[in-house]
Image (cartoon, grey):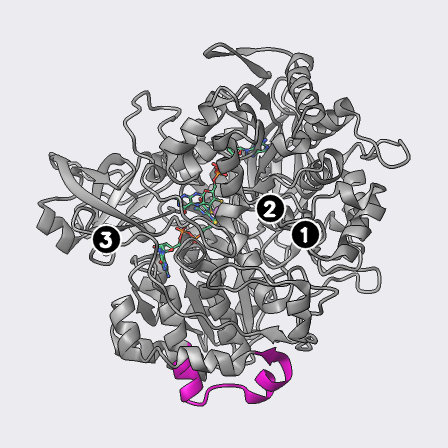
Amino acid sequence: MLDRKVDRIADPWGERTPYAAGEPWPVRVDGYLADGLTDDDVDGWFQSASVLHSNGDAMDVAVKDGRIVGVRGRAVDRVNHGRLDPKDLYGWQANHSRDRLTRPLVRDGDRLVETDWDTAMDRIVARSKALLDGPGGWGHFGFYTSGQLFLEEYYTLGVIGKAGLGTPHMDGNTRLCTATAAAAMKASFGTDGQPGSYTDVDHCDAIALWGHNVAETQTVLWMRMLDRRRGPNPPAMLAVDPRSTAVTREADVHLAVRNGTNLALLNGLLREIIRRGWVDEGYVAAHTIGFDELCAVVDGYPPARVADICDVPAADVERAAELLGTSRRVLSTVLQGFYQSNQATAASCAVNNLHLVRGMLGRPGAGLYQMNGQPTAQNTRETGADGDLPGLRNWDNPEHIRQLAELWNVEPATIPHWAPPTHAMQIFRYAEQGSIKLLWISATNPAVSLPDLARIRRVLRRPELFVVVQDLFLTETAELADVVLPAATWAEKTGTFTSVDRTVHLSEKAVEPPGEARPDLDIFLDYARRMDFRDRDGAPLIPWKDPEAAFEAWKACSAGRPCDYTGITYDRLRGGSGIQWPCTEANPGGAERLYTDGVFNTDPDYCETYGHDLATGAEFTAQEYRARQPGGRAFLHAVDYQPSPEVTSDEYPMLLTTGRTVYQFHTRTKTGRAPQLDAAAPDAWVELSAGDADRLGIVEGDLVGVASPRAAIQARARIGRIRPGVVFVPFHYGYFDVALADRTPRAANELTVTAWDPVSKQPIFKVAAVAVGKLAGAGGVPSPAPTVGGSAPLDPAVPPTAGGPAAAATSRTGGH
Ligand SMILES: Nc1nc2c(c(=O)[nH]1)N[C@H]1C(S)=C(S)[C@@H](COP(=O)(O)OP(=O)(O)OC[C@H]3O[C@@H](n4cnc5c(=O)[nH]c(N)nc54)[C@H](O)[C@@H]3O)O[C@H]1N2
Ligand SMILES: Nc1nc2c(c(=O)[nH]1)N[C@H]1C(S)=C(S)[C@@H](COP(=O)(O)OP(=O)(O)OC[C@H]3O[C@@H](n4cnc5c(=O)[nH]c(N)nc54)[C@H](O)[C@@H]3O)O[C@H]1N2
Ligand SMILES: [Mo]
């Protein structure tokens, strides 16, 4: 066994443990304990998994004197084999931040004042009852939740909304995150549910990363990919991203497409694969429908046309097609470069097409991850706390509604199902127009994360709108609320959640929450009790009182559906590895891969949607769907490329794209309060290519203004290797910051456009038109952008990002 000290700020990925195809990924146990403590100082370890991305990295939380003092990866877990990401190593410190909310707050004029729970809940319940009993009833309620609560919490919230109040206006921030993953899997395979398994990395001979900066956003998954790349018979790698990132620099083929053109590229790649005879004809004939239509559409995308639309060399398009067409086991991962870009669902379905025509599904190495982003986004979708129904049921299928009505013992008519559930962008529209009068926001910070922030602030400030915010901190959003509820969080409450590859983990309560903060589950249950929601027989609608009982109730809801949890118990999740769904008593080990037999969930009685026209978003009826007789075959979707809703002009000549850095999570409420992470990327920046910077007279560190048709922001320039004509701004930085009294606009979302994909309704955060200009000189000081990852500077004189002794983490290899 070898113990090393590693500065995981300077080196987010740690040392390599190379391995060959088909071998198990070696164990490496990462850990970090504060204040020079050692394992001997720890009073107890509590099992959990990461909540700062969707990878599901399993860890134990170290507790001493009732406080968290560190974390350690779990070697036995199938997901991470002991490894942890920098955010997970250092991010837990936010739990003990002195500015945690410890008491409820209620609005008193233009101030928020502390109060007790009864007063705060009474205000919400009084408003709820008045609205529910008045004209318009349930139509006035909107719920905007998260991808960061636990399964039990979402399921409870879902039942409150659907069977208690009967409102269709409930969605998660998963709409901004992985709505397209769900939409693309439903459209191609019939239901949500990742076909692949992380072990596909161990077997593949090519990896294609579609708009996914996995090195910074699923750091441990990237370690696995890198370890294969450094071992014998490494997989080939293709990356599609307009920026230069650690991923694109590692890739054998990098297509730095113009943002907003993914579908043209995919159509071109599919055309090459079909023309050059790389199609698995047997698989296509047996397991898909729509091949002829697909051929007809993609035929219009020869390499020269793709090169023109995407602005990449035609020869590189051909090289990419060859890499995909000649590998025997291709693994694809798709994320925000597709989901938040133009034609999101159609482009993501085109990746599904690629796997279908090559027969690259359901066997080791031939994997597909329509990725998640947030740790528990999968559960928001499964439990119906977003715009879906619980158990991946179809809102338009009366039998599915009947099943839920039976389960909850309510009238089917109570459960909203006359139209699809309302998506988040529409919920905010209704709040803006005044039909939604109570908006309950849990575990999300829309005043930083939604597009066009001036508008969002305007909506949340409307005096007619009663806003409830349930959070750990007084965020930009909480500041605008009428009632603020202090929540307990990860490690202060118990619950389960599910990672990208369907692995379910249990997260145990390790410490007490601060002050009067309460678990979100308790808050929702308290609301249900005070509202006195009843079933058909007059019994309480929600009989469960704790997480484990909520989990058991959810299991009954999941039975017989693709996400079947009936074989999982809290006890089975303790001690060993997480377990993949579907997991039944007959199959207690869970399922490594879906669709191993080529039979998809497209049966009309089983599927989650009757589908859409992917170009327009128009919905198909049950009749139209049945007429296609899918019979367990997957759908190949063929859609023509269309330009983004906002394109460049003389006034706004550059394309904006936005995204992440490895050190920060979202709006930084946690990572901004962890000293090592905060210091590594303390403020916003603007990434520019050298050519654009020269033309605009900008050098590294200059203060620049970025203006879109909506607003303008200021930040320091990082001159890097991004595609010319494109600027990148990280979306992490709101105007409210623990250490920042200055409220000069710096949030990327001041700039972004209110526009969304017609099918998934996911906002387009990755394409907007902007103008960039210099405001002030740098005086030789570089921008605050990290030198690691996508923001690496061209100028070698910029001092490298490092964490120093405060970031000394441990890394143990060679053990078992
Ligand atoms: N460190 C860190 N990790 C995280 C998170 C975090 O905030 N910080 N958040 C988690 C969550 S919720 C999510 S959703 C994931 C997101 O994970 P990713 O999707 O990997 O992250 P992003 O940086 O949003 O976008 C990825 C890449 O898309 C590229 N891109 C932009 N426009 C286009 C385009 O039109 N086409 C293509 N092909 N690419 C484009 C960007 O240049 C960027 O490098 O990360 C998760 N992990
Ligand atoms: N321009 C641009 N905008 C984007 C994106 C982009 O790439 N570009 N990405 C989008 C994506 S993918 C995402 S996922 C969203 C993320 O956007 P948000 O969801 O707004 O981001 P977070 O900062 O994670 O907000 C989560 C909030 O929940 C609180 N919280 C954490 N744990 C708990 C808990 O246990 N209980 C309660 N009650 N509260 C808790 C945190 O303090 C925080 O305020 O942003 C989206 N916005
Ligand atoms: Mo996300």
Toward the viewer: 708 or 780? 708
Disc 3: which residue: 648
Q: CB of mark 3 within 8 Å of CB of mark 1?
A: no
Q: CA distance from mark 2 to mark 3?
A: 36 Å
Within 10 Å of disc 3 (Cα), the crowding (few <14, some 14-19, many 20+) is: some
Say if residue 2 shows up in the picture. Answer: no
Residue 525 highlighted magenta (yes or no): no
Q: CB of mark 2 within 8 Å of CB of mark 3?
A: no
Farthest residue in the right direction?
537
Q: Position of residue 15 (x, y in %)?
A: 43, 56
Query: Which mark, residue 251?
Result: none
- Does the magenta stretch mainly form a helix, a strand or a loop? helix
Q: Position of residue 705 (x, y in %)?
A: 20, 37
Measured along the vertical axis of the image, is residue 775 above or below residue 363? Answer: above
Disc 2: which residue: 376
Toward the viewer: 419 or 323? 419
Q: CA distance from mark 2 to mark 1?
A: 10 Å
Toward the viewer: 74 or 464? 464
- Magenta stretch, residue numbers: 270-289
Q: Earlier in the sequence, mark 3 or mark 1?
A: 1
- Is label 2 or label 3 in front? 3
